[in-house]
Image (cartoon, rainbow, N blue to C red):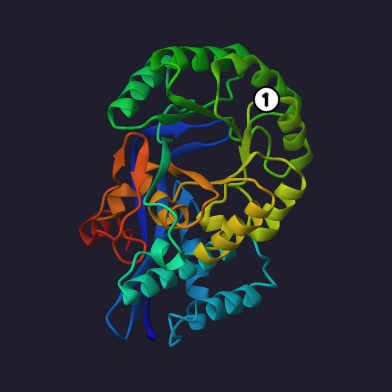
Amino acid sequence: MKITGFKTTPVVVPFDKPITTAIHDMRSVGCVLLELETDQGLIGESYIFTLNAVRLKALQEMLLGFEDHVLNRNAHHIGAIWQSIWNEMNPIGHKGFSIAALAAIDTACWDLVGKSAEQPLHHLFGACRDSIKTYASGGLWLSQSIDECVTQAEGFIESGFRSMKVRLGKLKMRDDIERVAVIRDAIGPDIELLADINQGMRAKQAIRLGRALEPYNLAWIEEPVVYHDLEGCSDVRRALDTPIAAGETEYTRYGMRDILNARAVDVLMPDLQRIGGLSEMRRVAALSASFDVPISTHIFTEHSLSIAGSEPGCISVEHMPWYAPLFNESLDIKDGMISIPNRPGTGFSFDQQSIKHFSLN
């Protein structure tokens, strides 16, 4: 099965209204869609993104720069393709847009392999489940009022979620505490509540806030400090009973290894784009398992389900609705669980009409 076509399409998917976290101000996601065509007529699909479509052209150019490592190659030779691109990027480094481009190519190749075998990827990887816990992450933003958060939280429950995440990082700690207290009261004790500080605090601040939030039974506190402060994150973890989750901002197995060696997390959160695709995500899952640390995948809900369905150490996936308009298929959520599709490949295909609507070409 030879790869004969390499097509990239930049799109911008706007949000209904601007949203913020402790460090982000977001109005849209800009994506570069990748379609790899084969001599058998199959098309492997994937995407990578930037917030607010910033430097989207640069991301597309990075992808196109690796085209010659893909065209005319056997799509089943994913390991060889991955390694050749990894070796090529040595002069520019193994982080940033270069890894994102590798991630898109790797994931699209795996999509091709699944489609060729007429099997879902989690079956090819070795299935361990058909559904997994998910949490609502597309809301409860720092830019929303507490009343808006309560209304949205109640809507999440009505939509089938049994877990949700609130963003924290107000200038005054008491405002964060009030936000959590009111939401917890509204959803009751049986709904899982997570909190994300989005790297917005120093370690001592995060420890103070974490201790104040302990009565509200948070399932985890995510990214309490800037991502590269592993010592600070470890200090927060040791000081609190509440589990600490992080990892979405680091790259490849080497970044994950540093986090694990620092004993900085209770839950590791690899991001498909920053990890380097499904191949590297599987390596990271194995690495994390050797530390007895579970993983929970960061965004890329649709394409991360193959990992969730094949890695016993994956405890949940983040449900982020930003990219849903790009796909023909929708996510199936019931009683807090998200179904892992049995369709070939990743199980999701681009909606060409939507792509035309959002396309920048």
Which residue shows up at 35% across the image and 56% down it?
11
148 up-or-down from 285: above or below:
above
151 up-or-down from 332: above or below:
above
Residue 107: image x %, image y %?
Answer: 45, 66
**Residue lying furthest left in this view?**
353
The reply to whether residue 63 is in sight is yes
Residue 325: image x %, image y %?
Answer: 28, 49
Which residue shows up at 44% across the image and 12% down it?
185
The reply to whether residue 33 is in sight is no
**Residue lying furthest front in this view?**
128
Which residue shows up at 65% across the image and 57% down it?
287
Residue position for label 1: 241
Per the image, label 1 sits on a secondary structure element best described as: loop
Q: Where, quadrant-wise, is the C terminus in this rendering?
A: bottom left
Indicate the quadrant where residue 154 lies.
top left
Residue 118: image x %, image y %?
Answer: 30, 72
Residue 251: image x %, image y %?
Answer: 63, 56
- Categorize mark 1 by other alpha carbons within 10 Å: few (<14), some (14-19), many (20+): some
Q: Is residue 21 left or right of residue 241?
A: left
